[in-house]
Amino acid sequence: MILQLEHIYKDYVQDKLVVPVLKDVSLDVEEGEYLALMGPSGSGKTTLMIIIGFLDVPTSGSYFLAGQNVAGKNDRALAKIRNSSIGFVFQSFNLLPRQSALENVMLPLLYGGVGARERRRRAEEALEKVGLKERMKFLPTQLSGGQKQRVAIARAIVTRPKLLLADEPTGALDSTSGRQVMELFAQLNEEDGMTIVMITHDRNIAAQAKRVVFIRDGELYFEDPVLYAPASSYEAYDDSDEEDLYEDDPEEDDPNEYDSEDEDTEDYDPEVSEEDFDEEGADAGLPDAPEGSEEAEI
Amino acid sequence: MFENIGLSFQGIWAHKMRSFLTMLGIIIGIAAIIAIVSTINGTNEQIKQNLIGSGNNAVEVSLFQDDWQYEMQYNGIPEGVPVLSEKDREKILGFDEVEAAAFYHRRNSPSVFRGSTSLNGGNLMGTDNNYLKVYGYTVREGRSFSQEDLTGYKKVVLLDDQAAKTLFPSENPLGKTLEIQGEPFVVIGVAVQSSSFQPVINSIEDYYTYMGNETSGNLYIPYTCWPILFQYDEPQNVVVRAISTDDMTQAGKKTADYLNEQVKNSNNIKYKSSDLLEQAKNLQELSSSTNQMLIWIASISLLVGGIGVMNIMLVSVTERTREIGLKKALGAPKSRILGQFLTEAAVLTSLGGLLGVLAGIGLAQLVSRMAEIPIAISFPAAGIAVVFSMLIGIIFGILPSVKAANLNPIDALRHE
Ligand SMILES: Nc1ncnc2c1ncn2[C@@H]1O[C@H](COP(=O)(O)OP(=O)(O)OP(=O)(O)O)[C@@H](O)[C@H]1O
Ligand SMILES: [Mg+2]
């Protein structure tokens, strides 16, 4: 058992008002699992991931990582665990804009105290794994959205963590790039035995995981609850296109929309406009994205 | 660490305009201080050279009553002060700091005539060749005193350059006769100071300070002739040459102490060394104290500069919340974030300090050219200025850096 969450509660306090976000969440994740976490916007997905990833502590409940209780660990110890045991992938990449791909990937190793030569070797290895070794000198602004996300994945796996946490990793990507990311995840899970917990809005993406759990209003469901029943969220679920995994569905648009507001560290992202273009022509069912690189075939 | 310094330069370069404006307070403050210090140093150096350089490390040890020089020509021979002998001179020469020593009698404004031309002011000295040696005089024309001049009470006189010009404006003085205190004396030589020292005169005040008693020149006669013109048993003044400028104070003090052992006077008459080094210091202090005010004012600019740095750093921390959060998520400990921001502040202000030093040197040069004030750029001061700016960065960087280090990584990741 790599992850063991028992009766986790998380409240946020805002203007003296206590907002319960996670309510009695219990979850076990086995080593080597590939788990997707689904749920409407505001249901507490990111909050849960933050707790799993040691970026915050729960209000109550206990949490074990690889059998180790993390309660009561100090700041430095938590930083160390984050560095060595957990890899993060974010929706908006979060690459340092003025550092090359290689430098971005080397960053966690620097914090882990790895020597310069070894840092470089391992970073190159990780970039090779995501198929971007030849672009390692590029700055984030010189990379496409999909490439940026793959650099971010390289950065997440460079320390060979036990656990890879991804918060809507395809949310800001067009379907081709999204597919590449998913392929990479599948490969990391199958070949390297990495445990993956991935948040997504997208059923098609979730379908690629080995197990799907659902969260709604801070409560965890192991079967699909009727997520779309009350209109508490504008993000109604649409099952109509479930058959075709790779057809663009309208939901995919939403993350992009707030991504573009989100992007204060990133520069103009060509993928967004490409995506728009893609969507207009989506009915034609064309094999998408003129991103046109050799990795495009699936 | 080097990683951080590199990153800091990257950051500074990425926001050139902002960084420059942030540094401006520091640049102006440091530039002002460097310019002021250069001017103070220049003036001090000049004062010191003017006062000390003229005398070849000579220290005069003469009789004082309380704080006033004791003038025998007005006050008569003091009681209980013995006439000094060759034995005393040898004792004085035995001091480690003393290289040469001489005794002399002196009168201000003696009566000296060459025909109808008279020496107004000036000094008459009764002495021997040792005196010339102590002050570094060489005889340019003619000869110095001979043994026979001294033992035979010969009425001969040596002139210095100034006196020669005053009394013999258009003829060679050698062999000519002068009337000193009504007695005829024959000119045997003209002595000049071998070091061609010229005090630097910048103002009227300087002129009086350095040139006051050099207007009409000095005359030297054998000390054995002194009683012919004045009194017998008149005690001498002493002048010693220290082996180095730094030894002047000690040489003067030891000599005065030795001489005072033999003085038994109830009217507070004592030998005192007129310490030029001390005098130079007093003058320097006078000129420094006004400038010290300016330094305080410049320091206020540094304070304002520091606050500016703090302000911009705080803005920068807010702006970079996301970057900081990411780094924490990747496992950067607090200390590392703290170090990064402190380094950034320190690099920023050190760079400001460096630019300030350059600007200050430029400013000092400009001032010296326009106002004809001497400057001396002090490299230690420049070094201290840069280190000081770095400290300002560290001190005023603490608050923003702590703020950055304590950021919650989730705020960072959710920060819009
Ligand atoms: N710092 C905070 N203070 C107060 N409330 C917060 C805070 N962070 C999150 N919340 C609230 O917690 C709830 C869950 O947020 P969370 O980000 O986990 O949702 P999510 O499932 O990831 O949504 P999305 O799919 O839109 O990313 C939201 O209602 C949000 O307003
Ligand atoms: Mg979320």
Image: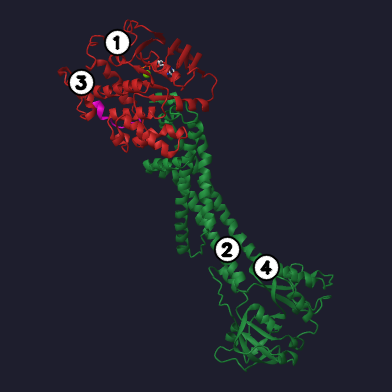
In the rendering, which numbered label is found on residue A236?
Answer: 1
Indicate the secondary structure of the residue bearing disc 4.
Answer: helix
Tell me the distance, in whole angstroms, between the alpha carbons under discs 2 and 4: 19 Å
Q: Chain of mark 4?
A: B
In the rendering, which numbered label is found on residue B247?
Answer: 4
Camera-near label (3 vs 4) is: 3
Indicate the secondary structure of the residue bearing disc 2.
Answer: helix
Camera-near label (2 vs 4) is: 4
Q: Colour of chain A?
A: red
Q: Residues within 10 Å of mark 1 (few under 14, many from 20)?
A: some
Q: In green, which chain?
A: B
Tell me the distance, in whole angstroms, between the alpha carbons under discs 3 and 2: 80 Å
Q: Residues within 10 Å of mark 2 (few under 14, many from 20)?
A: many
- Percent across and percent down for residue A159 are 42, 29
Count how many numbered circles sit on residues in the image: 4
- The answer to whether marks 3 and 4 mark residues whose Cβ atoms lie closer than 8 Å is no
Three-letter amino acid code of the residue under disc 4: Asp
Q: Which residues are magenta?
A: A264-273
Residue at point 46%, 49% (across, down) = B27
**Residue A269 magenta:** yes
In the rendering, which numbered label is found on residue B44?
Answer: 2
Q: Residues within 10 Å of mark 4 (few under 14, many from 20)?
A: some
- Percent across and percent down for residue B168 are 58, 89
Residue nearest the viewer, comparing A139 with B363? A139
- Percent across and percent down for residue B268 are 81, 69
Tell me the distance, in whole angstroms, between the alpha carbons under discs 4 and 1: 95 Å
Asked whether the viewer can see residue A84, the reply is yes
User: On the image, numbered disc 3 is attached to which residue?
Assistant: A279
